């Protein structure tokens, strides 16, 4: 039985990844920061599928909390075979209006949090000469987004980290890849009007927006043996918005 740890797993893409891995027979560790009840509900849903699950609170921007999270997961579910770094936050606004604290919060969560989790996971993976890390990046990390400078910078950093780490740990039998979503219909889209959504669809060659399932399917593919010869790559799942 394999174990996956998914950060930011209480909702949206992370929650769908958790369900997708559970349906493939993985034991699932769900990280959440504030949404405890949603995480607990998801644990119950996953356990009903016949696998083990646990929910662990941690702010991935804090390395001490990350270490404690990994210790808890190891105690409850054993060694972590797959890590999905999904936790992230965004900030929309002009760079000139952004405060130091707002900048640091995005970088610390989206980029440093990914680093902290990779560092913890690799201690087991390198020893086992086996393991998979899938980082959730963003199309804005590939091309940049106006008024999302910090988010774009953090996700570009995630892509660079993915490529560098793949070279570093490949000889130890560990694969590291990224999935780079486009516009995905999650609750983060709640503030968009119907007109905004229609405009985004018009900007997408496939004329539709993504679903959490689209991203989760890409993640589990990269975690599977079907991707055994793939590492250091960025799989862009964006409907053609960025080519």
Image (cartoon, grey):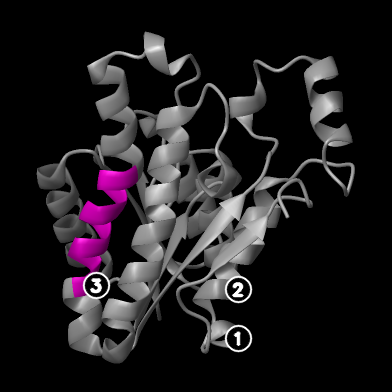
Numbered range of the magenta stretch: 111-122
State whether residue 56 appears in this view: no
Q: Nearer the viewer, residue 139 or 129?
A: 139
Q: Residue at x 33, y 85 (%)?
A: 170
Residue tagged 3: 78
Q: What is the chief secondary structure element of the magenta stretch?
A: helix
Q: Left or right: 84 with respect to 139? A: left
Quarter of the rendering occupied by the C terminus: bottom right
Work out whether 88 lies above or below 25.
Answer: above
Q: Residue at x 44, y 34 (%)?
A: 151
Disc 2 to disc 1, C-alpha distance: 7 Å
In which quadrant of the rendered view does residue 150 lie? top left
Confirm or deny contact between disc 3 and disc 2 (CB under 8 A).
Answer: no
Q: Is 179 covered by the magenta stretch?
A: no
Disc 3 to disc 1, C-alpha distance: 24 Å
Disc 3 to disc 2, C-alpha distance: 23 Å
Confirm or deny contact between disc 3 and disc 1 (CB under 8 A).
Answer: no
Q: Residue at x 85, y 16 (%)?
A: 195
Mark 3 or mark 2: which comes first in sequence?
3
Q: Secondary structure at mark 3?
A: loop
Residue tagged 1: 226
Residue 33 rendering spot, x and y as whole percentages = 32, 34
């Amino acid at each position: 039985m394999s174990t996956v740890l998914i950060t930011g797993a209480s909702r949206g893409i992370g929650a769908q990844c958790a369900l997708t891995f559970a349906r493939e027979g993985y034991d699932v560790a769900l990280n959440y920061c504030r949404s405890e009840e949603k995480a607990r509900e998801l644990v119950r849903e996953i356990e009903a599928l016949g696998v083990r699950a646990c929910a662990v609170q941690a702010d991935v921007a804090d390395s001490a909390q990350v270490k404690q999270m990994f210790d808890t997961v190891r105690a409850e579910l054993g060694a972590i075979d797959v890590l999905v770094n999904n936790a992230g936050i965004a900030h929309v606004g002009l760079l000139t209006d952004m405060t130091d604290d707002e900048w640091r919060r995005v970088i610390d969560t989206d980029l440093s949090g990914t680093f902290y989790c990779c560092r913890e996971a690799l201690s087991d993976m390198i020893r086992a000469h086996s393991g998979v890390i899938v980082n959730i990046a963003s199309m804005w990390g590939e091309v940049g987004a106006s008024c999302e400078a910090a988010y774009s910078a953090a996700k570009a950093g995630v892509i660079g980290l993915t490529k560098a780490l793949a070279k570093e740990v490949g000889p130890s039998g560990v694969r590291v890849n990224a999935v780079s979503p486009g516009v995905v219909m999650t609750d983060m889209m709640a503030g968009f009007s119907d007109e905004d959504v229609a405009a985004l669809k018009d900007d997408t060659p496939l004329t539709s927006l993504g679903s959490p399932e689209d991203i989760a399917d890409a993640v589990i593919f990269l975690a599977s043996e079907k991707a055994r010869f793939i590492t250091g790559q960025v799989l862009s799942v964006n409907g053609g918005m960025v080519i």
